[in-house]
């Protein structure tokens, strides 16, 4: 006899199920359409090019849970629920195929395999749900806010699974199904129900069957009205992801006369993808628990920002000041922790920068300190406001070549504003010049013709200032035919490498840590004396998260013979020093100092040295060390400074 | 002026940004113009901000920026339009290249006279030359009453007056003056930063270019002063600061080239390990008048 | 050249420091060139001892205008009076110290009298018919030398703190009162209200002297030293961001990029390293005195005068000696 079961055993009037199904579909369709209508409010954006690349990337993220699994426990939780529900859904489809299309799928060997598979899927889902419930209600994990809808979703799922099992158990118990043993959980439950008389079993089965069906259809109807919408939006969001360089802020066309509004002022100024993002967000809070601004008690939470967008997606009028707090817009360091963590690839930074653009370009409304900084940059090409003619002063007496019409140097050494003007960072520039010379590299600097790369202006939303700097710099770089640059500033690095191409730049940019690591490896740079001691290293956001350079600096540290003590939160989980996104130029009025928090992390490693690879990190950590009154015990250096010590052989390193 | 609001003229000059050095042509003994780094005169920008605020407060007012400046500075001047000035008139003529402060003031007065004006605002001095004369002379030439070095300019008790705050050592004066008048501004909130849309419009707004003929002159007003030559900076004090000989402490005279805003400044770094050496240094400070002790009461007018 | 005049401003019992400097320079030049020097003083009921004290600077004569119209701050009346006096007496040169009043009066006079004016002069080089004047330009990058193009009166205002003040006597001088009737034009400029400033509450951006402390002050208590020094110097107290972070000083005192941008005549930086964010707020100070234990502190790069020492040692000595010097100056003022 062929293995199978009667689909609608014990169920009369199962036609009602189709009616319920239609109701669920309407609820589902209406919900999706309502959101779709809201997404459509946004501006256009092309997120459908390179289809195969998109599909390939999405498959890994969705089916493989690449991102989600970064957090072990919740990753497993989601993986179990995801695959459980997907399998059960597939099982239900099988049933539908058989019942409605008459296909004989639920028969024979296949049926026998399906049974334990579905049982296991149900079990997996249940385990996942238990983890979820414990995280949410027992452990009260960070980043989660418990809303009633979260409870409803969990209850629905749990109800579906549990009722499904019981229904099966009841059926097996009442029909003495000969293939019941293929459903291990069903048969176990049936065994437990063995003493109940059949009449009751049959009656209970009927009730629970309908309950199960109603819950399942309710679940479908509930999808677009809750965070369950991510079942639809999250996979699509990974497909619609940005394929641009991670560190690049989207370009803005300022020349177009037809455009009257720049940046984000009202909701319509967001792209549809920005709005779509808000519906993909699952409120997991991963972004929030890594956000330096949030953790330092500033009025910014990336999660809240996205959720507020979602809640107010139908609103009219201004975004900044109503939907999003003004201070929140300026609190972001563009560290990228949120985007790095977000399992559904929500893009926070572009939204924040676009809002800043709206404030700066259309309203001229920004923290008052910035007026001076913008004007400094306009008049002297650097935010410090020191004379442009003093840019190359740091190199006086160091015999550094200034680029000329002659043979192009192998590398143009892009010093950057901090390296040129800030006393502390000038020492790093001197170290860099020394290293390049000792390695026998033919390099030159632009001298006084270098202008700020524009990183801070762009991230502060002053796109006009940014683009005028880009134009100026590209003109000069192209004039000298320069293509290869090395820089010690991750911000210059990222901007020159990832953003200048938007304006026709075609530059090969390398960060000094990469170059030094190469030189050490190739033997062009030889270490005279190993340094010893322990050092902790701060991963700068703009070479780390935004450009995935994690190993080069660590290779250098290893080559120096220093022991590396990693801080809490390193590599892609590094905690921002607090200076990115133009925060270097603003006062911190609310909450704690971000740099002090990070300094505390560094001090926890008990290293004698804190190494940075970014002028801003250096300033911030050094300030933090001073604030903690530890500057006599711990020193803060740029990696280049350690390298020059080791290479010159002045091993006065603690 | 009642029905039409205030007609405000603001005198704005492009000046060299002294955060950057100037090159002095050793032969001609003049400044090499290619080394000039133009910006809007900072005190003028503060005056402009005051003008814009007045315009925002008094309906139907207008702000006209008047400048005597070479064409090469137009890029810098355009900022005035970007922040919201209604009109920008720039006067230049080859014949005024050697003009002194008085002649420039005379030209400015002539341009201002060519239109209706109730209030003239200007920075109290130019940041590069520091003459601090132009505003006062313009007022004299126009026959306007004047208040110099104001902190704020506000509408007065009636439309025919303005209210001005000014600080003199030891006290703050609240002053008033009948219009038309001229006020030079010393301090105040910084010039607003333009919106991009306004900046874009400013590129398209024509700058009214004037020459001598346009203001009815055939030649430049005669200069009363002449710059004989420019030289590298001379110490402001006649006696050079700290000749090590009479410094019993180890006095190092350092010529610091790099760092900070001020190039080539003589710096004395004294090591003061004990009280007597500290005393010596302080004596030196007093002698060299690095510190001038304040007169106890009402030290000035 | 026959005669050099100096406008002397008095305020209550005091002769403005800038006027003293101008007068002394006039006397020095006058002696050398053998021309008559006149100290011109305007006011009403000027105390006799002031006139006598003026004499000790060595002018040949002290010319006094005693008139109600010029008894208070009134640039307009001053301009009127001077215009008439200068037209009548025709001196060759009028020197003035740099002051709030002279800054307005000098250009107005020059305009009315059709003569040249050089402001903020730092050096006077005598010629046959007047002076060749040196002044700074594009400060601090250049100096300029200016000549007068017209015959007749030359008006020159002198930059502050440049000329020496000497009162070595005895000198013979005459005190003359102006008898010439003076007429005054009416003016609509009115002082409606005068608010006295309390130097302790002085806004940092208005202070001529700022004494600022940083983390090197070591503790909140040591800021008392700064308060004391500020009082002696008649200045205000500033702080670096570190000092503010340590809660040693309120936020309003913070100097720097995200604090106040100041440019006083004198900035005393005590235990401040000179981080660029701080320097951005005070680099345009005229004179910077730095006290720091670290001889390599970046603040010394921009300081006019640096003292390598512990603030706890240096400041008390400073306070004491400046206080003494102040008292000394006071004594001299009255003993003369
Ligand atoms: C976004 C941002 C904005 C900032 N804005 C400002 C700003 O507006 N203003 C500002 O000031 N800073 C600002 N900073 C901070 C700045 O980077 C420095 O941290 C700060 O200026 C240092 O203050 P400090 O000189 O008092 O302390 P430190 O740098 O620690 O210097 C202390 C100095 O005191 C000396 N010293 C120690 N003991 C003694 C003693 N007994 N006697 C004499 N000297 C002694 C030491 O040698 C040292 O040079 C900002 C920083 C950031 C990141
Ligand atoms: S970029 Fe960094 S600071 Fe900004 S919202 Fe994201 S995590 Fe927070
Ligand atoms: S934005 Fe992303 S990381 Fe943040 S809560 Fe939403 S889904 Fe989670």
Image (tube, grey):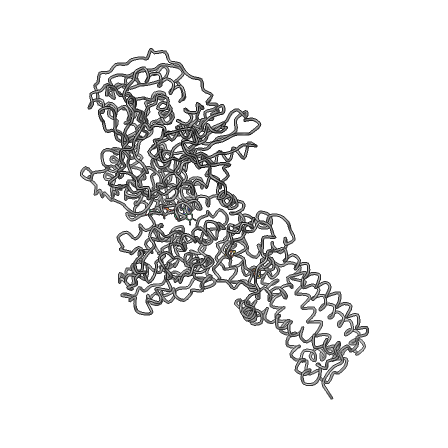
Classify residue C34 as left or right of residue A387: left
- Which residue is at the front of the view, C234 or B143? B143
- Image coordinates of residue C307 in percent, x first then y, are 28, 42
The x and y percentages for residue B80 are 46, 39
> Could you say which quadrant of the image residue C287 lies in?
top left
For residue A142, above or below residue C121: below
| Quarter of the image with the N terminus of chain A in it | bottom right
Answer with left or right where residue A449 lies relative to residue A292.
left
Q: Is residue A228 left or right of residue A204?
A: left
Which of B174 and C327 lies nearest the eye of the viewer? B174
Residue A596 visible here: no
Residue name at image x 28 percent, y 62 percent = A438
Q: Give the percent coordinates (x, y) of residue A489.
A: 39, 57
A372 above or below A596?
A: above
Q: Going by the picture, which residue comes out furthest to the bottom?
A: A1
For this rendering, which residue is in front, A264 or C241? A264
Q: Nearer the viewer, residue B108 or A417?
A: B108
Q: Position of residue B25 (x, y in %)?
A: 27, 41
Q: Quadrant of the C terminus of chain A?
A: bottom left
On screen, residue B234 versus residue A470, left or right, reads: left
Task: Answer yes or no: is residue A248 visible.
Answer: yes
Q: How many marks?
A: 0
Residue B262 quadrant: top left
Direction left: furthest residue: B245
């Amino acid at each position: 006899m062929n293995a199978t079961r009667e689909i609608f055993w014990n169920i009369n009037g199962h036609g009602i199920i189709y009616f319920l199904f239609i109701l669920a579909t309407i609820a589902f369709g209406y919900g999706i359409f309502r959101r779709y209508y809201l997404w459509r409010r946004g501006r256009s954006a092309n997120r459908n090019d390179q289809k195969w690349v998109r599909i390939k990337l999405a498959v890994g993220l969705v089916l493989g849970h690449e991102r989600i699994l970064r957090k072990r426990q919740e990753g497993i939780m989601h993986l179990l629920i995801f695959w459980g529900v997907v399998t059960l859904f597939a099982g239900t489809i099988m049933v539908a195929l058989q019942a409605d299309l008459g296909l004989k799928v639920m028969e024979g060997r296949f049926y026998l395999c399906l049974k334990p598979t579905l049982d296991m899927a149900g079990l997996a889902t249940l385990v996942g749900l238990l983890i979820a419930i414990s995280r949410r209600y027992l452990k009260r994990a960070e980043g989660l806010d418990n809303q009633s809808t979260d409870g409803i979703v969990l209850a629905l799922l749990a109800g579906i699974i549990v009722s499904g099992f019981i229904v099966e158990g009841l059926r097996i118990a009442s029909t003495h199904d000969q293939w019941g043993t293929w459903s291990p959980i069903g048969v176990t439950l049936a065994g437990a129900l063995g003493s109940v008389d059949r009449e009751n079993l049959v009656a209970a089965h009927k009730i629970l069957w309908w309950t199960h069906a109603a819950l399942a259809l309710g679940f479908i109807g509930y999808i677009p009205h809750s965070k369950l919408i991510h079942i639809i939006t999250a996979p699509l969001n990974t497909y619609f992801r940005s394929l641009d360089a991670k560190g690049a802020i989207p370009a803005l066309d300022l020349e177009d006369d037809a455009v009257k509004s720049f940046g984000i002022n009202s909701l319509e100024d967001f792209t549809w993808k920005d709005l779509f993002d808000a519906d993909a967000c699952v409120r997991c809070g991963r972004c929030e628990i890594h956000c330096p601004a949030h953790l330092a008690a500033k009025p910014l939470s990336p999660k809240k920002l996205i959720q507020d967008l979602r809640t107010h997606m139908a609103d009219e009028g201004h975004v900044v000041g109503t939907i999003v707090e003004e201070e929140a817009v300026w609190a972001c360091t563009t560290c990228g922790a949120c985007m790095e963590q977000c399992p559904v690839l929500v893009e926070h930074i572009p939204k924040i920068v676009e809002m800043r653009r709206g404030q700066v370009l259309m309203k001229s409304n920004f923290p008052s300190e910035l007026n001076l900084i913008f004007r400094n940059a306009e008049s002297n090409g650097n935010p410090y406001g020191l004379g442009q003619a003093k840019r190359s002063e740091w190199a006086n007496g160091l015999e550094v070549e200034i680029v000329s019409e002659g043979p192009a140097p192998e590398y143009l050494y892009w010093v950057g504003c901090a390296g040129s003007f800030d006393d502390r960072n000038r020492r790093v520039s001197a170290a860099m010049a020394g290293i390049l010379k000792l390695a026998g590299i033919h390099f030159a600097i632009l001298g006084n013709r270098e202008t700020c790369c524009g990183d801070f202006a762009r991230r502060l939303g002053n796109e006009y200032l940014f683009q005028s700097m880009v134009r100026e710099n590209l003109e000069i770089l192209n004039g000298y035919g320069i293509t290869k640059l090395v820089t010690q500033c991750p911000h210059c690095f990222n901007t020159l490498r990832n953003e200048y191409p938007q304006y026709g730049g075609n530059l090969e940019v390398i960060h000094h840590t990469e170059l030094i690591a190469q030189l050490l490896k190739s033997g062009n740079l030889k270490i005279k004396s190993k340094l010893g001691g322990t050092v902790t290293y701060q991963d700068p956001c703009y070479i780390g998260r935004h450009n995935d350079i994690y190993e080069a600096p660590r290779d250098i540290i290893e080559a120096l013979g220093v022991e590396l003590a990693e801080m809490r939160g390193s590599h892609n989980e590094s905690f921002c020093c607090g200076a990115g996104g133009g925060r270097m130029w603003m006062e911190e009025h609310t909450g704690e100092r971000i740099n002090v928090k990070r300094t505390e992390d560094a001090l926890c490693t008990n290293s004698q040295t804190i190494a940075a690879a970014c002028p801003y990190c250096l300033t911030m950590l050094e300030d933090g060390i001073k604030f903690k009154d530890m500057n006599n015990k711990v020193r803060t250096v740029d990696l280049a400074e350690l390298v020059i010590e080791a290479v010159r052989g002045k091993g006065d390193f603690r | 002026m009642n029905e039409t609001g205030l007609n405000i003229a603001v005198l704005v000059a492009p000046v060299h940004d002294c955060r950057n050095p100037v090159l002095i042509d050793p032969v001609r003994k003049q400044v090499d113009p290619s080394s000039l780094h133009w910006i809007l005169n900072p005190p003028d920008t503060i005056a402009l901000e005051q003008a814009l605020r007045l315009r925002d407060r008094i309906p139907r007012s207008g702000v006209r920026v008047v400048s005597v400046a070479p064409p090469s500075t137009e890029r810098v001047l355009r900022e005035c339009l970007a922040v919201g000035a209604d009109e920008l008139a720039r006067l230049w003529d080859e014949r005024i290249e050697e003009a002194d402060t008085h002649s420039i003031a005379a030209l400015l007065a002539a341009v201002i006279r060519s239109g209706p004006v109730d209030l003239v605002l200007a920075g109290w001095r130019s940041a590069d030359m520091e003459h601090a004369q132009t505003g006062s002379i313009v007022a004299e030439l126009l026959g306007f009453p004047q208040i110099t070095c104001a902190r704020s300019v506000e509408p007065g008790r009636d439309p025919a007056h303005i209210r001005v705050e000014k600080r003199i050592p030891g006290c703050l004066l609240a002053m008033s003056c009948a219009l038309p008048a001229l006020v030079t501004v010393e301090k105040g909130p910084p010039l607003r930063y333009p919106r991009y849309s306004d900046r874009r419009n400013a590129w398209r707004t024509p700058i009214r270019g004037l020459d001598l003929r346009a203001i009815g002159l055939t030649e430049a007003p005669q200069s009363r002063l002449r710059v004989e030559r420019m030289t590298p900076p001379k110490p402001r004090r006649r006696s050079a600061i700290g000749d090590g000989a009479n410094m019993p402490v180890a006095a190092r005279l350092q010529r610091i080239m790099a760092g900070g805003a001020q190039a080539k400044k003589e710096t004395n770094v004294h090591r003061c390990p004990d009280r007597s050496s500290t005393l010596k240094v302080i004596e030196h400070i007093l002698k060299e008048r690095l510190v001038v002790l304040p007169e106890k009461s009402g030290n000035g007018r | 050249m026959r005669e050099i005049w100096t406008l002397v401003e008095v305020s209550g019992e005091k002769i403005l420091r800038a006027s003293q400097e101008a007068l002394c320079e006039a006397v020095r030049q006058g002696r050398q060139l053998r021309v008559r020097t006149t100290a011109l003083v305007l006011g009403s009921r000027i105390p006799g001892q002031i006139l006598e004290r003026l004499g000790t600077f060595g002018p040949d004569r002290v010319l006094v205008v005693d008139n109600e119209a010029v008894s208070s701050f009134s640039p307009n009346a001053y301009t009127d009076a001077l215009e008439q006096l200068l037209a009548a007496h025709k001196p060759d040169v009028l020197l003035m110290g740099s002051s709030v009043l002279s800054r307005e009066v000098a250009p107005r006079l020059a305009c009315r009298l059709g003569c040249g004016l050089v402001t903020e002069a730092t050096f006077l080089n005598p010629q046959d018919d007047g002076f060749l004047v040196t002044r700074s330009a594009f400060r601090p990058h250049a100096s300029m030398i200016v000549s007068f193009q017209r015959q007749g009166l030359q008006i020159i205002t002198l930059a502050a703190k440049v000329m020496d003040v000497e009162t070595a006597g005895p000198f013979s001088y005459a005190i003359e009162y102006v008898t010439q009737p003076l007429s005054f034009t009416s003016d609509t400029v009115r002082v409606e209200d005068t608010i006295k400033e309390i130097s302790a509450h002085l806004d940092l951006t208005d202070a001529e002297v700022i004494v600022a402390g940083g983390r090197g002050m070591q503790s909140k208590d040591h800021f008392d030293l700064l308060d004391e020094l500020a009082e002696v110097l008649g200045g205000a107290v500033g702080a670096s961001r570190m000092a503010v972070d340590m809660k040693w000083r309120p936020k309003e005192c913070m100097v720097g990029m995200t604090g106040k941008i100041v440019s006083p005549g004198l900035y005393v930086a005590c235990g401040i390293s000179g981080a660029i964010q701080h320097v951005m707020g005070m680099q345009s100070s005229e004179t910077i005195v730095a006290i720091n234990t670290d001889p390599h502190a970046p603040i010394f790069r921009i300081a006019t005068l640096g003292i390598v020492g512990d603030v706890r040692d240096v400041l008390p000595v400073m306070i004491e000696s400046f206080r003494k010097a102040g008292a000394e100056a006071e004594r001299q003022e009255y003993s003369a």
